[in-house]
Each structure stands twice: as C-alpha cells, then as structure tokens.
Image: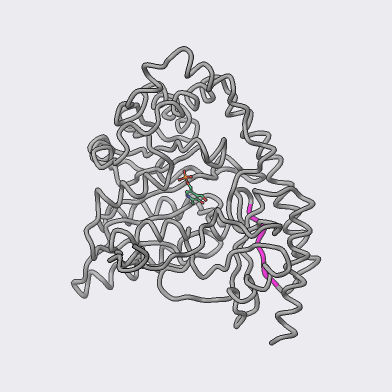
Amino acid sequence: MTTGYRYARRAEVLGESVYDHAPGAIVLSSGLAYPPFLPDVVREAMEAARDRPAETLQYGPLMGLDDLRDEIAAFVAADGVICNRENVLVVYGAKSALDLACRVFTEPGDCIVVTRPTYMTALQIMRCHGVSFLDVGQDEEGLDTGELEARLLRLQRNGERMPKLLFDVPDFHNPTGITTSAARRRRLVELAESHGFVILEDDPYRRLRFEGEPVPPIKSFDRNGVVIALGTVSKILAPGLRVGWAIGPKEVVDRMAMQKADGGSNPFAQRMVAELMRSNKMAKHIGDLSVEMRGHRDAMVDAFREFLPEARVRAPQGGYFLWAALPEGTDAEALAGLALTHGVEVSSGRLCFPNDLPGHHLRLAYSFVGVEAIREGVRRLGDAWKEYGARA
Ligand SMILES: Cc1ncc(COP(=O)(O)O)c(C=O)c1O
C-alpha cells in the first residue's frame, strides 16, 4: 500500500533524518561524536560476552544493572548529588529518560516550561505527549527566573493550568552554550517547590568543561525531590552505546521504569559502561576529549571571526555547540539551504523555538569533524552568506 495510511498527526511530515547527511558536505549540523575519539571498548565487550552471558544476553533488570547504578551514583556524587542505587534508573539515553518522565507526569494538554530556544529533539519528544509549552527567555545567567516567576504568578491569578514540568540544559546549553548560574539554579528549585512542578535537568555536557569553574548541578540544591537529573554517556563516551540514566526519588524512577517499552535496556552495553566507569577509563577519556573539543571550539570561533564576522557568536565554556545570531531579518533556513550547495551542513535555529519561530539563528556543532574541516566548513558558510547577501 503506497497511499491511504491513516497516520498520526505527529508522523504526517516526513522530515529528513539528521543522520542522512548530504554526500561530500562538511557536517556541522549535529552533535555526533568525533570519530577518532570513539573509545576502544574491545576488552569490555569481549569480557561482557565471555564472562557474563547470563547477565548480558538476557533481559536485564528493569532498573538497570546494580553495578552500573552504583557506578552512576558514585559518578554524580563527585558533583554533589547524593543518592544511592534505588534513586538511579538506567535507560537507553537521556532522550529516553525524558520520554519516560513525560509518560509519568503529563496528560495531553499539560504544560511544560522550556527555555527559548531549547534542545530541538527534546521539543519533538515532548510534543509527542500532546503538551503545550511555556517558553522563557535566557540571558548570560541562564533561564530568566524573573520572567518565569512573573508568568507563573499570572497563570495562577488567572486560574490557568500550571506547568507540571520544566526542562532545561543548565551546562553548556544546547543550542546556546550558556551555563546557568548557581543563584538561578537555586531559584529554579525554590520556584519548583512553591509552584508544584518537577525540574528535568538534562546535563549531557557537564564534564566537557574547557575552562572556568563548574557550577553545582540543580539536583545538588534539591532537598524535597523536585528535580530529576538526566544523564548519558553519549557525549562523554559514545552515543551508540545508548546508555543513560535518570536520578530522582525512588517512587518516581520506579514509575518511570514501569513505563519502559524495552524491558531491561540492553544489559550488554550497561556492563561495558560499568566497567569503563569502574576502571577509570571513562574518566581518562573525558579528560582527553575535553582537550580535543576545546581545540574544535577555538577553531570554530576563530573561523567565524575570519569568515563571517557579521554573526554574533558566544564562545561556550564547554559542550558541543555554537549558536550564531545573524543580523535580524536573515532567513537562516534559506541560508542553511544555500550553505549546503557550498558543501557545508548547518542547522537553522528555527526548530529550537517552541512557539514563535525567529528565523535568524544557526546552530553549529564542532564535535564531529576536526579543526581543519571546521575552518573549511565555516569558510564555505561565509561564501554562502556572501551569496545570500548578493541575492537579497
Ligand atoms: C541536551 C541534550 N540532551 C540529550 C542529548 C542526547 O542524549 P542521548 O543520546 O543520551 O539520548 C543531546 C544530544 O545532542 C543533547 O544535546
């Protein structure tokens, strides 16, 4: 049957997959791992298969392997998040944790607070749950808690539906690269307590800090179980492992586990990750990767100065992404299309906005290609910009 399927609304538009890249183009569009830095996991994979087939090739425990849950609890303890095994749910990645949290907390029509802009894939996941968004601006300190509070009070006064969840990426935000200040993090927890919503703290980039002092996780300020911390090894080891976690009150993570559609979330990969964490191989990898990514970040910021000085870019202190604001009125979607004809793939920032659609931002990732290709890619983008200007 080629026609006549009665699709759900969310599946009506068949967009291009972010993994289907244009042949020959330099990919600066998505936060893929840098191939030369994919970790060597041969020993861990071999041992998982040879020594523990009854564990790794069987359906795993719904909550995840206990050894991995303990390793994750120890990993986050270094950031001041005090929890134990029963608070840790192992999942297929942070995106899966977000989906499970939406299943547990939302009904269609419920409202979720997000930053404006926010992580585009998170929006897509949340939209599948039929929710609406309360979008709040950001400044150099992160989500604007003053604006959030004013809007919460207005909703309350008008007797409107209050948000159930808040989703944020406090460290090296995707897409803006901003890191939320400690004061704002504390304030978010206070607002969650006083207005009865739960914070989903999505923090995949925290350990990839190039400079400056780390800020304590939002979860570390949480005394009353209003924060669920989402983590993943996708950005600090390898996204193909599909191992992530959610940390929260036992009654919440237990409920999230019951919503899983996957049984025990790949115990084979979990065993490998537990060993990589236990042996400190992961810690060493993170150190090496941070040095490499810092070089990538510098190459991209320098290339913007040289080839596209009209764009406003802020050098993030860590993470994978650069957010470029072009002069107001620029159609970033058209520019991204033109860039492809010049042999470079970048993302228009439009998809990062939940409600309105400002069109003059680009999101670029410096994670996937090396410094030479980053420079060449931004040079091509600069050529596309010149052509765009000439056409306009
Ligand atoms: C903010 C954020 N959360 C989560 C993810 C992906 O998480 P995972 O691969 O663990 O599902 C990404 C990847 O780009 C991201 O930027």
Taking the image as shown, residue 71 lies to the left or right of residue 320, namely left
Is residue 312 within the magenta segment?
yes
Q: Would you place residue 154 above or below residue 208 in this image?
A: below
The rendered magenta stretch, by its main secondary structure, is classed as: loop
Is residue 226 within the magenta segment?
no
Residue beneath the point at 57% across and 68% down: 348
Q: Position of residue 292 (x, y in %)?
A: 71, 41
Residue beneath the point at 63% across and 63% down: 346
Q: Residue most toward the front? A: 1
- Which residues are drawn in magenta? 311-316
Where the N terminus falls, by quadrant? bottom left
In front of the other: 22 or 108: 22
Where the C terminus falls, by quadrant? bottom right
Q: Which of the 4 image quadrants contains residue 329?
A: bottom right
Taking the image as shown, residue 285 lies to the left or right of residue 137, namely right
Q: Residue most toward the left? A: 159
Q: Position of residue 265 (x, y in %)?
A: 37, 34
Residue beneath the point at 28% across and 55% down: 197
Q: Position of residue 150 (x, y in %)?
A: 34, 70
Q: Residue most toward the top? A: 51
